[in-house]
Image: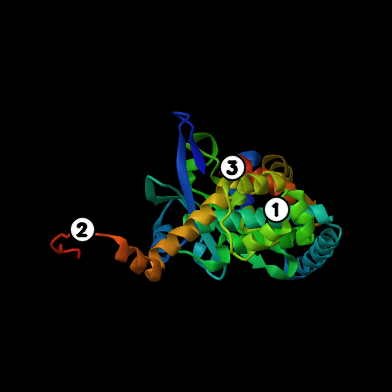
Amino acid sequence: MKLFHLGSGEALDAEIKEMDEETSAWVKRSSEFSFDWTTEHAYEIYTIYLLKDDRNILGLMSLIDRPDEYRVHLNLLEVSKSNQGRQKSLDNIAGCLIAFAAEEAFKRGYFGFVSLEPKTQLIEHYRQQYGFSQYGRYLGIEGTASQQLIKAYLGYE
Amino acid sequence: MSKKGEPTYDKLKKTLSDQEIAQSYVLRGTMTEEEKQAAEAEFKKLRLEKLKSMSDEQVLQGELVRMKLLIRDYLQQNTFLPAFSFASQLKQYIDLLKVPHGQFAQDIAIHKTKLSRLIHAKEAPNVDFMYRLEIHSGAMIPASFWYRLYAKQIEEEIKTNQEKRALASEKVKNELKFKPTIEG
């Protein structure tokens, strides 16, 4: 998968993997992340980083596996402060993490279904940016929409 | 050191637009337990209805995406797994289609006996067969994946088949001999 350096337009190779203890300790100390990620330890936590700099975590995501409902629930996602808003240097961090969640949802036999609980004000942005649809008070993405998300952010179908 | 003052939507809104927040966060849910139970019940109903209404084509497509991703992950690993042999994956592919083997053999224009031999690993697949599998899957599973599955299997056989190695050894003369190195 690629992240884009906004200054140079360069596409940089990135990777996502499950968070290990060393990274967890780093995140706890880092001023780049504001959430207390230790509260997510009951769930699966994934980190994204550039291949050329695997010590610099750029984003975090926690997933809850819900096999009873054939879905993966995206509980929390946070992009590093340096890559938020107008001053960000790398683009597509959140998109790559959400596409990775969709991939996991395919691999687990859930037809790519990922759910999340949105803030009302953000619903339209999640729909437009990533292709989510409304499921009551939750949002969900699945099937062809998940495939498109994977293709757009991870570079393959 | 623990984190203090976790971000909330209202705090973030002071410095980021809604679009920028959506590009940087999925925030934890803030529903009360009661609200959450009601929302979960509503969601579950909708989710199960959606699952029931999926067409056979949608189910097959989802299962093929799953198969493709699992093969891709396997090909990135160094270990050989019998469940990912060419024959096992071919059988799995045909099982997903839910068509009789004879019908599938006709669809890809090979004799059903040949298909049976491929499924039971009694015959080696050729590249033409791999192209046909790719085309049959609507390009979902590329021929290169089938090739690499087979190549990985052959590599494992080469590494572990001591019987063939011993037979080959009997036929080789004037083999080169070197002094043992530290690596052995």
Element on which disc 1 rests: loop
Is residue A30 left or right of B141 when viewed as pictured?
left
Mark 1 vs 3, N-terminal side: 1
Q: Name the residue under label 2.
A: B174
Element on which disc 3 rests: helix
Pick the quarter of the image with the C terminus of chain A.
top right
Colour logic: rainbow
Identify the residue shown where x is 74% and y is 66%.
A69
Which residue is farthest top?
A8
Q: Mark 1 points at which residue?
A: A118
User: Which numbered disc covers residue A153?
Assistant: 3
Disc 2: CA contacts within 10 A as few (<14), some (14-19) or many (>=20): few
Identify the residue shown where x is 79% and y is 53%.
B58
- The residue closer to the viewer here, B175 or A15, is B175
Q: Is residue A113 visible?
A: no
Element on which disc 2 rests: loop
Instruction: Kindly check if marks 1 and 3 are in contact, taking CB atoms under 8 A apart as contact.
Output: no
Give me the chain letter of mark 3. Answer: A
**Amino acid at circle 2:** Asn
Give me the chain letter of mark 1. Answer: A
Disc 1: CA contacts within 10 A as few (<14), some (14-19) or many (>=20): many
How far is the residue under mark 1 from the one under mark 2? 73 Å
The percent position of residue A45, horizontal first and vertical second, equals 53, 62
Identify the residue shown where x is 45% and y is 29%.
A7
Give me the chain letter of mark 2. Answer: B
**Callout 1 and callout 2 share a chain:** no
- The residue closer to the viewer here, B5 or B98, is B98
**Amino acid at circle 3:** Tyr
- Asked which quadrant contains residue B71, the reply is bottom right
How far is the residue under mark 3 from the one under mark 2? 56 Å
